[in-house]
Image: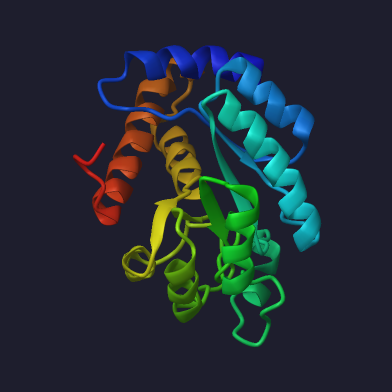
Amino acid sequence: MEELSCFLLPMAEKASVPVVVHFDHGLTAEKTRLAMDLGFTSIMYDCSTLGFEENCKAVAEMVREAHSRGISVEAELGHVGSNESAAEASSASDTSAYTDPEEARRFIEATGADALAVSIGTAHGAYRAAPKLQLELLRKIAEVVPVPLVMHGGSGLSDDDFRNAIRDGMAKVNIFTDLNCACAKAAHDFYQPGCGMTDLIPHLTEAVKEATLKKMKLFGCVGRA
């Protein structure tokens, strides 16, 4: 993490638009505090595997500490699983991991978190089958939660899925797998015998840039920094 922060923070300072250096899925207080010490301006403290009261207590403590340092906090309620459980997570008959709207409202009141990642049928990683987003649930959460809602497990959703989720309340969308795959494909396409990593880096950078810009246009966030 130390090496990554030394690379990212100078880039953020040179950017011509506002930049947040975000530490995603901090699973322990120790690692999350280290991220803050290293200069991350936004952290996610993910206690979603804990019970509701334990999640509230842990996040509230971290929020107090982070806010005293001018750092914003994202939390998670419900549980966005891995792609191995994508089919189950997207099944309308399995609501065990979904975020409950009333609990979400109480959670934000109790913790003071600045953003909330919610579970509405997405999963991390590559999907084996198309997920079924629970948009009615999303609308109910958005009606009672006063902070921005965050979608995890966005890679692999259809364009309409994104448009509908943003329309119904999602303010932040996390993308990794799609960008990771674009980078890997560029490495495959541009490799030739004798080619080293330094030769590939410009192609990898351009591929990720193009994939990112495509997502930005889809999300409607171009020119809105």
Q: Position of residue 27 (x, y in %)?
A: 74, 41
Total number of numbered labels?
0
- Position of residue 177 relative to residue 52, above or below, is above
Across and down, in percent, residue 155 comes to 48, 55
User: Within the image, what quadrant is residue 201 found in?
Assistant: top left
Q: Position of residue 119 (x, y in %)?
A: 59, 65
Q: Residue furthest bottom?
A: 93
Q: What residue appears at the point 42 percent right and 51 percent down from the top-left corner? A: 172
- The residue positioned 59% from the left and 76% from the top of the image is 90
Q: Is residue 174 above or below residue 15?
A: below
Query: Residue 21: image x %, image y %?
Result: 48, 28
Q: Nearer the viewer, residue 222 or 54?
A: 54
User: Residue visible at 65% across and 87% down?
Assistant: 93
Quarter that holds the N terminus: top right
Relative horizontal placement of residue 130, taking residue 213 as reference (left or right): right
Q: Is residue 196 visible?
A: no
Quarter of the image where one finds residue 167: bottom left
Please report the residue visible at 59 percent of the width from the left and 26 percent of the height from the top.
68
Above-or-below relation of 186 to 196: below
Query: Quarter of the image containing the C terminus?
Result: top left
Closer-to-camera residue (73/132)? 73
